[in-house]
Image (tube, rainbow, N blue to C red):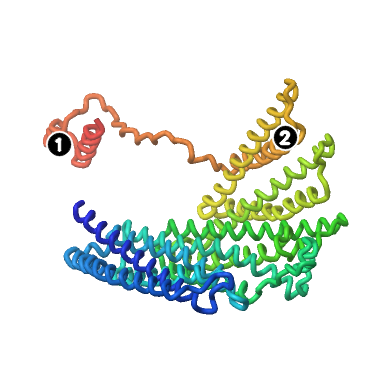
Amino acid sequence: MARNLYRFYLYAVFDALLVFAMVALGRLLQTLLELTPLRDSFTPAPSSADVTQAVVFALVAWVIVGLLGGLHYWLIRRDMQGDPSSANSGIRSFFLNIPEGVGTAIALPLMGFSVVSSIGQTPFAVVGALSFALPTFVLVLLLELERRRTQVSSGVALTFQRLHFYGVQLVLLITLTFAWQMAVRPLVDSLVFGGRGTLEWCQSNGLTDNGNCSIPNLIGLTASTLWFLVFWLGYGWVVRDDQSTVLRFILHFVSFAYGVGFVLYGIYNAVILIVLAVLHEAAALREIVGPNAAYDFVSPLTFGLLVVGVYAVWVRMAAQQRLIDQAVAFLIEDAITGILAAGAFWWGCGYVLYNILEKLAPSPAAPDGHAWASAIALVVAGVAYIPFDLYLGRRYAVAASAAAGPRRAFVLTLLGAGILAFAVGGVTALYAGITGLSGSPLSNGTQVMHVGLAAFFVGVLVVGIYLWVAIREQHFTGLLKQPAPAGPPPPVVPVHPGKPGTIEEVLDELLAGKITRDEAAKRIRALESVSFSS
């Protein structure tokens, strides 16, 4: 305990001193960068006094940090020499991996969105980003060099290292999402439509008259997207040999589901556009490829396909390493896709039913063409869940051992969702109906009742289907407590009247010549069995 407290003190103070040194470097960089063309036109240049103050502060800070930090680093090295197990210490791993991961997760997005995205145009607000990101990268580099001096092998130390790598990878995936959508839409507008989508958007908002319609910086947006894409793939490559079968697959399959969600969203938007065109309410180009486009389908669809493809490859790599059976991995991906598609399908069915109820009992917010298009698009986007369902069921019937987990997760998830829809929808409908009959109606009681009824009927249908499937495929079998199997009954020893009941009597008869040797051995074995069972 005392040794761990001492080690905690050493690493905590060492990290804090490093952070303080980087703060001093950041202040110096900000002052110096404001003397360059990177400075904004509205920011005044620093005076000679500002420069002197920044330089003096940095030098003083570095001297103090160098002395105290050097002392604590020497103590750290001495602790490692005296206790070789400290290389695999959870405290060391925490203070090296967590600050490095947090710094990377902050600095990379800051550089990508603020600095890299400004390539190709006049720099704007990049001094502050650079003065923070560059010292953070220096801190990350120093921590990484120290981390590489030793290799963790197991325990809490390895857990912290995995949290570092997988956590940063997840942050980069999220930031790549925004960068991709910011870049792909204007790229499609510019390369395919000649920028008409942006022009229409500016005209609709009255920005062309005062000259405030700005053209997107395609070079910077593309560079920013590539920045995040490279680092995201890089972190995935770093953990390609990780033997973790829990954290690795949790991240892989959750990210796979994330990509499937974007694919479904892209299909949903594309179908809406088709339905609106059929209803003679075609969307304007600015609503497809313009800024803040409501029906952009290209960027979510392409991004979703990218994410699904990359994580499918990484799961195949794990299967080649014997961490998971490839057939089981494919079935898990099938189940994930089917569950998400089923959510869209049944939500769309409920939306269609709600629109029908609104037509039968009109309310102030009767469904228009966009409401019908949205409902139909959800159904069409999710209808692919049916072949996924059938495929899982067929695989379960053929090879239950491999498909049992994915199939059971699929069926029970839909059954649980159906029960929730049934319960929540029924309560909502009854609530709206009872309050209306009691003379205290809701202001939008008709709509609330229609929403509840739609959810209730969809829930009844889903529960009916998947409760029958769960019973037919015996998905509840083995989940209930089974009685302990009874032990084998004791051997029945035949009773022969007049025959001896002890080993001594058997031996006496054998010596007297009344029984044979084989018969004596048989009786002795029978007597031993009775004695053992009793």
Q: Amino acid at mark 1?
A: Leu
Q: Is residue 169 left or right of residue 301?
A: left
Q: Where is residue 263, by image quadrant? A: bottom right
Q: How many marks?
A: 2
Q: Which mark is residue 232?
A: none
> Badge 2 local density, few (<14 within 10 Å), some, or many (20+)?
some
Foreground residue, 107 or 309? Answer: 107
Q: Is residue 352 left or right of residue 135?
A: right
Q: Position of residue 113 (x, y in %)?
A: 56, 68
Residue 320 visible in the current orientation? no
Q: Name the element at disc 2.
A: helix
Question: What residue is drawn where x is 47% and y is 63%?
Answer: 106
Q: Position of residue 154 (x, y in %)?
A: 31, 60
> Up-down: is 4 above or below 449?
below
Q: Name the element at disc 1.
A: helix
Foreground residue, 391 or 411? Answer: 411
Q: Which corner quadrant holds the C terminus? A: top left
Residue 371 visible in the current orientation? yes
Which circle's residue, 2 or 1, is located before the other in the chain? 2
The residue that label 2 is drawn on is: 448
The residue that label 1 is drawn on is: 510
> Badge 1 local density, few (<14 within 10 Å), some, or many (20+)?
some
Tell me how far mark 2 sits from mark 1, CA to CA: 95 Å
Q: Position of residue 213 (x, y in %)?
A: 73, 68
> Up-down: is 191 above or below 419?
below
Q: Is residue 436 left or right of residue 7?
A: right
Question: What residue is drawn where x is 32% and y is 73%?
Answer: 59
Q: Amino acid at mark 2?
A: Val
Q: Position of residue 290 (x, y in %)?
A: 74, 65
